[in-house]
Amino acid sequence: MSTPIIDVRPHKRRELIAVLRRVLPAAALLSEQEDLRPYECDGLSAYRELPMLVALPETVEQVRAALAACREHGVPVVARGAGTGLSGGALPDPNGLLLSLAKFNRILEIDENNRTARVQPGVRNLAISQAVAPLGLYYAPDPSSQIACSIGGNVAENAGGIHCLKYGLTVHNIQSLQFVTMDGSLITVGGAALDAPGYDLLAFMTGSEGLLGVIVEITVKLLPRPERAQVVLAAFDDVENAGNAVAAIIAAGIVPAGLEMMDNLAIRAAEQFVHAGYPVDAAAILLCELDGVNEEVSEQILQVREILKQCGATESHTARDERERTLFWAGRKAAFPAVGRLAPDYYCMDGTIPRKHLAQVLRRIGEMSADAGLAVANVFHAGDGNLHPLILYDASKPGDLGRVEQLGGRILELCVTVGGTITGEHGVGVEKINQMCMQFPASALAQFHALKHAFDPDELLNPGKAVPTLQRCAEHGAMHVHGGNLPFPDLERF
């Protein structure tokens, strides 16, 4: 006679609710289904899961107490920022606590002399630049979602943005972090100085996707506004020519503040949405922003326009004033919601490749799109090779999501094949976890797990995300590219 399976979740849930009600304000613990529903997914809405409970702490002590209680009861915890992530990194655990940092939304200190700001993780990315604008300063990383995304989530995913080519990703623009481990310990990494002895745990935490600790405070670096910033918009009748122009600009020793590319499908969607003045008949456009002192910008604009002409640009326009510059960028930053008007759903990919392979990878993505019968709009940070193919589909059609996931996986395999990686700024989350098996050998994955175990020995923080188990890799038959047969043998390798 078999032993009946007993569902222990209701009992554990009641116990945890009783403990958390003692350490959190009454309104800071959500348990009813209608209250849990808004937290069932992040920006990657293709995957949804209701959390067991949601907590909205207001103080560091409340975070520490909540984590300690969850560890004592063996309950998983998923930290969540603004929910704008695009890899399922904040997908809840059905048997766990969803820990929202939404109430940690204060700018604690602005140090004008040292050009830093100390902020809580729920502060919006754009709010930092708005707060320090009267001082002539700004915070450089600017994801397309910067009006809504939170700085804590930016750190967890190592977010970038259109200006990351020159000014770096989040990891290059923060100076210290405070985070809470699963046992409730409060740890500070980094500091007032630019460097410190020992391991670089500040970089280690950035991009850790909530697997190691819950970030409760960040000190960000601020930059002075450049004397002048100007954008050149160039149109091409061939996508490969646009890709070659990107490589040519960098090869000339010019480092633009931003160098972005959009293909025709994305151009038309953005133009209809924003009316930015984009040439809708172009196969691709480049947006190249140059900033610095006035004389330097003038000289570089002339150089860039000549390079664009040599690479086959059919037309180019320099923004006449700040209004037009802002409008050019508005079209690019609104590209994701604009493409959302073309189909009921889209699946946003995120891979990075060496710039020299940009043209051939774009050509192959076009071929793969045609083979799969799925339209793909390409919007990406061309300067650092960070691609964002947007695969259009209809989730209400049976089988469509599966076809999209298959095409997305092939695109990521393509990125790895030419020497790139499966993510540039969106993180791995649940979306790309199988492709991690392809990119890294078993020995590397084992080390990733060993590092997590050092911070979270019970593996309760954001379980099942970012780093696959070796068993998962074996079950999915995932392939590691290591000198053997490649999925795209005809492509030039790195």
Image (tube, helix red, strand yellow):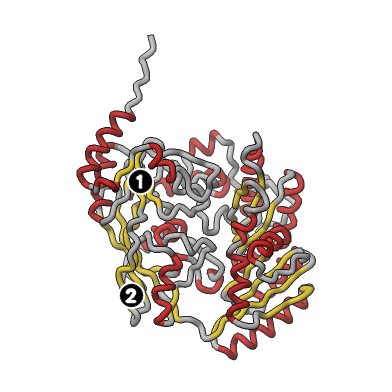
Query: Disc 1 to disc 2, how far (Cα)?
Result: 35 Å
The residue nearer to you, when weighing 445 against 398, is: 398
The disc, 1 or 2, on the residue closer to the chain's N-terminal end is 2
Does 314 appear above or below 2?
below
Q: Secondary structure at mark 2?
A: strand
Viewer can see residue 358:
no
The residue that disc 1 covers is 453
Q: Residue furthest top?
A: 1
Query: Pointer 1: residues within 10 angstroms few (<14), some, or many (20+)?
Result: some
Image position, residue 222 (x, y; %): 41, 75
Q: Quadrant of the C terminus?
A: bottom right
Image position, residue 311 (x, y; %): 76, 73
Q: Please give the name of the residue rendered at 74% of the width and 69% of the height, measured from the top-left corner.
A: 279
- Count all numbered tags in the image, as a single digit: 2
Quick check: 488 left or right of 25? right
The residue that disc 2 covers is 110
Q: Please give the name of the residue rendered at 71% of the width and 58% of the height, measured from the top-left corner.
A: 265
Q: Residue furthest bottom?
A: 295
Viewer can see residue 433:
yes
Residue type, mark 1 in image: His
Q: Quadrant of the N terminus?
A: top left
Image position, residue 210 (x, y; %): 40, 51
Does 404 appear above or below 296?
above
Q: Please give the name of the residue rendered at 29% of the width and 54% of the height, measured from the top-left corner.
A: 180
